[in-house]
Amino acid sequence: MIRNLRAELAERQRPSVTIWNRVEGRPRSVEFDRALRAEVRDALWMLTRQWQMGEFHGDDAGSPVLAKVQVAQAALTTFQARDATPVAFDGSQPLEAVVERRPLDHLTAGGLGAADLRMMLGRRFLKRIPPVYRQSFVERYAFVAPDPTDEDDTERVAHLEVYALLQSLAGRAMDGYRLYQHLTASPSNTPLTGIAVAEADKPGIVEAGVELVGWFDAMFERPAWQSAWDPAHLEHQFAVTANVADGAKRLVAEEYPGGRLDWTAFSVDPAGGRGSGKLAEPSTTIPTATRFNGMPDKRWWAFEDGRTNLGDVSADTTDLARLLFLEFALAYGNDWFTIPYELPVGSLATVAGLAVTNVFGERLWIEPAGRGVDDDWRRWSMFTLDVAGTGREPADTSLFLPPTLPQSTGGPPLEDVVFTRDEVANLVWGVERVVPLASGVGKRGSEAAEETLAHRRRLEGVPPGAPVTGDAAAPISYRAMTTVPENWVPFVVMHVPGDVRATQLQRGAMLRLMEGVPPGARVRPRTTLLRVGLDQETAVPYHVFEEEVPRAGTQVSLAYQRTRWRDGRVLVWLAATRETGRGEASSGLAFDQLLPTPPAP
């Protein structure tokens, strides 16, 4: 213990005692660069810090500098719609157009017809013939004015805009579709049938008919075979094949709803070939580090882009996918490299392997991941096809690049049907939200049903709001059943033939009920989506599998699609698209009601 610090300091008996009030450097230069670097001259301290930070742990992980890719390719050769006969497919058309295209049934369904298309065909033909014969063709292929008193013309007369259009076209315009039907009915048919034409003008008119048929056939993509749309499942079903070493590899798409087609819609058919196509020439390239938004910067002193803030992502202990993503992005993001390889559109590719050379001069042969059993939960793969079925099939490591569209433009819905469940009535309803008119456009189904019912009331001589007739002596009246809007088509549950447990939905029909009039004919749907089997020579029932209408319902729309293909051609086709519905609904259908008898007029 030092009792007299001043004496000790004066005598300097304890040289280790030092007093200071601050420590500062004594720079020998006016520059501060070296002082700011805070150099550490203790080599041992640096080594211990490196050991503490784990920098002495190393592994054989040289960066790749060169890669050679060996890929086997096979082009698509055939297309099969549902259970139809396979046809050749050369990739000259986008796969969506081939799959989704439907016949233009709305030209003839229900005895209506699209007046806009018919008139457009007629105008095109009349422009290509001498003016002296135009009136003759207009009279032979004329639009017929609808009869307001004819029950068969109800759907033409009930809607004011349709009635006015057909009245204006009658006797003034040519129905070009009737001429098209005449020309395509037999190869020997010509436009000259029933029309007197001078010999010098016959070749030009015949050529105009040939041009009309070719123009209309090229304007719309229509199936030359069975359509891929399955009305029982409310989705498209098709398959494509590619020739491989041990046969034809078949890719099936059994649940394509329409709209956007990609490789995820396909599965490998285990019954087909499982080999690979012809090996292409090896492709040599330089691997590059994979970059993505929000990736941590490799440099210490760098300001990172804040548009993607991975540090702000909140994840619970059960968010496994989110936690894996964060671990990949923050810890292992700089361990991935990109090796580009060009594939032709419409090809099925199988990567045989990669020969990678690293910075140490080592050459490594890397085979595709994901081999083994397809249903093995421990198998890892990306962008590969699954194998259809539930058997223990070997995994398929092929990459499929379908000839699909990046986007297409859709028109307004021509038809729109919502399948919804009604638990009160114990029915499934096909609600026609949009129905096609004879003018060629769609209209709200509820408005069209009201206008049609009002016209039939006028035909029956029933004034609007007519009361229910009954015995005035009785204070109450009995009503067996209420009515529903005519755009509500019922589907009842039926047993599958030959099965006592499985059920399916069968299209039914409501009786047309009008106040003061005995029950009339059955109400038939107006959309081609629900008229399946009605327009045949012998009507057949329409069934829908019950599992296709969940509790949320399902919605099917029909509209024109337009796009431009890679060769510059414009393609137009009529396609159906399926989406999720909006839940249950109530039709208000009720039975066995007692109502107060209205007073006599």
Image (cartoon, rainbow, N blue to C red):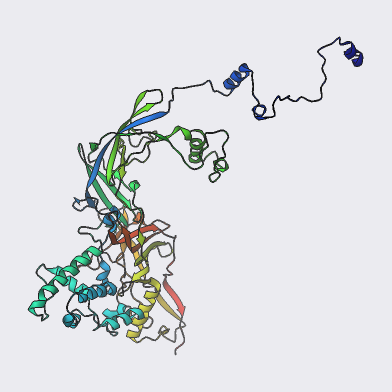
| 548 up-or-down from 188: above or below | above
Image location of residue 81, percent across then percent down = 24, 53
Residue 26 as seen in the image, left or right of residue 71? right
Coordinates of residue 469 in the picture (x, y in percent): 40, 84
Which of the pair 565/454 is nearer the observer?
Answer: 565
101 sits left or right of 601 in the view? left
Q: Nearer the viewer, residue 1 or 99?
A: 1
Residue 578 location (% of width, % of height):
36, 58
Determine the image quadrant of residue 13: top right
Residue at coordinates 27% horizontally, 84% vertically from top-left?
Answer: 147
Residue 333: x, y in percent? 48, 35
Whether residue 484 is visible to the viewer of this picture, yes or no, is: no
Q: What is the number of callouts on the image?
A: 0
Which image quarter: residue 120? bottom left
Classify the position of the C terminus by image quarter: bottom left
Asked if residue 561 shows in the view, the reply is yes
134, above or below 308, in the image? below
Q: Residue furthest top?
A: 13
Viewer-proximal residue among 469 and 407: 407
